[in-house]
Image (tube, rainbow, N blue to C red):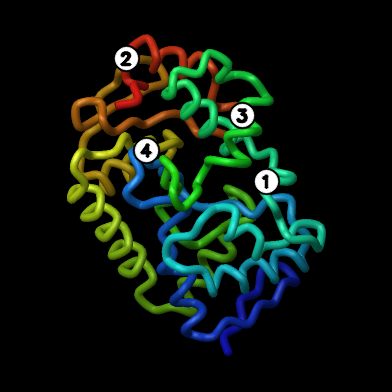
Amino acid sequence: MSGIVSGNIHLDLSPGELDNILCFLGYGHISAPVWFVGLEEGLAGMSEEDTIHNLKARAHFNPVMDLREAHLRLMRAGRPIDVELDPPRTQVWQYMAKIMLARSGCKEWKSNRAVKEYIKNNLGRSGGETFLTELSPVPTRRSNDSTWAVEFARLKPGLDDIVAARCIRLKATLEAMVPRPLVICYGFGSEMRFAHLLGEEWVSLGRQIKAAHHGQYLLLPFFGNGQMSHAVIESLMSLGILTNQ
């Protein structure tokens, strides 16, 4: 068994389990009309015990998972996470829901009630309209914590090549889709990495919006830490980009 240590956290992963984590693609429906692409999945706010359990559980995910089904295998405060009963209050999910509600023409897309209902019933679901993925399959506890990435790289020779091959698979899937989905990348700090994934160059449409592929690909601020705002969504609506075709 291979040991991954983060602080005083020690996790045993078999080579096969390690491979499974690295092969994970995302949540929802890969042929969905809207893709959300982030940098890496966060595990903030979890106890050490939950973190150990959740990393181990991820080693048994399918490459694409229904968001609710996947989170029922994970733990928060020692209990399974049921997004239909008590959805996590992450700003990332909330802004995804607001964008999708605005795209559908919902006039109450800012409403906490509407956002909560969308997260509970629609976001990242296997038969739904969204696919949630990341540039890297290696989760992190904090954006400035590279401990696990370093450990994965130590335990898995050629990790960069494996992550690159995963990105190539995502890109090939995307390019084969007719029509192309609306791809929404979030996080200006990873602008070049998103451009490399998509094989496109970004063009500014305003202070906080960049686009490529005739507006089919978008780069927006990171959805958490107060970086995203309703004004960005309103700008997308005024530009006619958020249309449910």
Q: At which x and y percent is residue 177?
A: 21, 47
Instruction: Give the crowd class for mark 1: few <14, some 14-19, many >=20 residues within 10 Å.
Output: some
Which quadrant: the C terminus?
A: top left
Q: At which x and y percent is residue 225?
A: 62, 33
Disc 4 to disc 3, how far (Cα)? 17 Å
Left/right of residue 47 with respect to residue 31 in the rendered view = right
Instruction: Give the crowd class for mark 3: few <14, some 14-19, many >=20 residues within 10 Å.
Output: many
Mark with earlier residue (3, 1): 1
Element on which disc 4 rests: strand
Question: Could you tell me which residue is drawn at 41 percent across and 40 percent down?
Answer: 129
Please determine whether, in this image, residue 242 is positioned above or below residue 218: above
Q: Amino acid at mark 2?
A: Gly
Tag 4 residue? 34
Question: In front here: 177 or 211?
Answer: 177
Tag 2 residue? 240
Q: Amino acid at mark 1?
A: Glu
Mark with earlier residue (2, 4): 4
What is the quadrant of residue 19 in the picture?
bottom left
Element on which disc 1 rests: loop
Disc 2 to disc 4, how far (Cα)? 16 Å
Q: At which x and y percent is residue 172?
A: 21, 55
Tag 3 residue? 115
Tag 1 residue? 84
Mark with earlier residue (4, 3): 4
Q: Nearer the viewer, mark 3 or mark 1?
A: 1
Question: In front here: 207 or 124?
Answer: 124
Q: Nearer the viewer, mark 1 or mark 2?
A: 1
Disc 1 to disc 4, how far (Cα)? 21 Å
Q: Amino acid at mark 3?
A: Val
